[in-house]
Image (cartoon, rainbow, N blue to C red):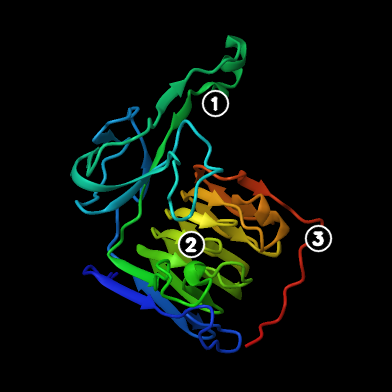
Amino acid sequence: DQPYTRQGMITLHGHWHSLKLPLCGTKTLFETRGNVEMHGKPLAVTWTELETTAPPGSTEIQLRRPVDWKPGDMIVIAASDKVVADCRLDRRDDCQVEERYVKAVDGSVVTLDRPLVFRHLAEELDPHLPAEHCHEHPELCQKTQVRAEVGLLTRNIQVRGSNLEDGSGAAGSEGFGAHLMHADQAQYTYVEFHWMGQAFQMGRYPLHFHLTGLNPAAKVVGCSLHRTFNRGITVHGTHQATLKDNVLYNHLSHGYFIEDGNEHDNVFENNLGMMTHRSLSMLNSDQTPATFWIRNPSNYFRNNHAAGSADFGFWFDTLRQAMHTLQRQF
C-alpha cells in the first residue's frame, strides 16, 4: 500500500574469486527464513505492442495503449524481420532488437532519443478459413495480430550487480552478476534487476524461489530483468506463486524457468520475454533454450509473449514423472 516512489539502487559486489559463503555464494541477497519485499512505483503499462509499423528512420512510435512512461526511461523494441539467433549479450551486433531512451510521451505516442535503424512491424492478417468454419467457430476467424512488442526496462528501484565488463574483475568475471535466492517469502513489485545471474553455475539465478513449498504470497509483478547471465526467474519446488506483467530481456539460457516438474498452480500472466541466448555449460536443454521453459503443465499461463529466442519461445519439456523434491539444506 505504500510503495517507494523515490529513486533507489542496491549494488551487489563480487567476482569469480571472491570469498563464497557455504550454500549462499557471493554477490547475493540470500534469504533462508523471513520475508523480503521491495515495492517500487506502480506502472499502468510495463509492455505493450506497436499500433502502426515503425519504418527505419522513425523517431516516434505509436503504441496500442497509452503509457505512463517518462523522459529518460529505457525501452526495447522487438525485431520483426530477422531472428535473434546471432544476437550478443553485449549487444555489439547487428541484431534488429533496438534499445532506445524515451524523449517524450503523448498518450500512446512515444518520441525516441534517436531514429530507429530497422523496421518494426504492426499488422493484422485476415484468417484464411472457409466462411462455414467462421460461422460455426467465430473464435477461429479473428484477425492474427503481428506486432512488435515494446518493453519498459526502467524502474525507480534498481537492484544490480557490479559491472565488470571492462575487465576490472578477476578473469572471467564479465559474466558474473548478482543473484537473489529465497527459501521463504519474497515479493517484488516494479523493481528493475540489471547485471544479474552468474554464468554457468547451477542455482545462481537472478531471481530464485528455492523449495519454498506452498507459497501463495510469493510474487514478482511489474519488474524488469535485463542483461542476465543465467536465466531470468526460477520457480523451484514452489507452488501458487504469481509472476505477472514482467519484462525479461537479453538473458542467457532459459528465461521463465520451472525447474523440477513438481511445481503446480503458479500463475504466469502477461509476461514478456525477449532475446533468449544459448548457454553451452548448463543443462543440455539450455543449448536450445526457451524463453518459457515449462516442466509441468499444471500451472497457469495467460497472455505471455516470447518475442525472439535463439531457439524456442515456449517449450513444454514435460516429464513422465516429476522429480523428487529435495529437502531444504538450510
Give whichever of 246, 91 is nearer the camera: 91
Which amino acid type is marked by label 3? Gln
Q: Secondary structure at mark 3?
A: loop
- Within 10 angstroms of label 1, few (less than 14), some, or many (20 or more) residues? few
Which amino acid type is marked by label 1? Glu
Residue located beneath label 3 in the image:
321
- Residue at the limit of the structure toward the right, as seen here: 320
Foreground: disc 2 or disc 3: 2
Whichever of labels 2 and 3 marks the residue nearer the N terminus, that label is: 2
Residue located beneath label 1 in the image:
139
**Quadrant in the rendering for residue 263:** bottom right
Residue 272 x, y percent position in the rendering: 46, 49
Identified at 55% across, 61% down, the residue is 231
Foreground: disc 2 or disc 1: 2
Whichever of labels 1 and 3 marks the residue nearer the N terminus, that label is: 1
Residue located beneath label 2 in the image:
228
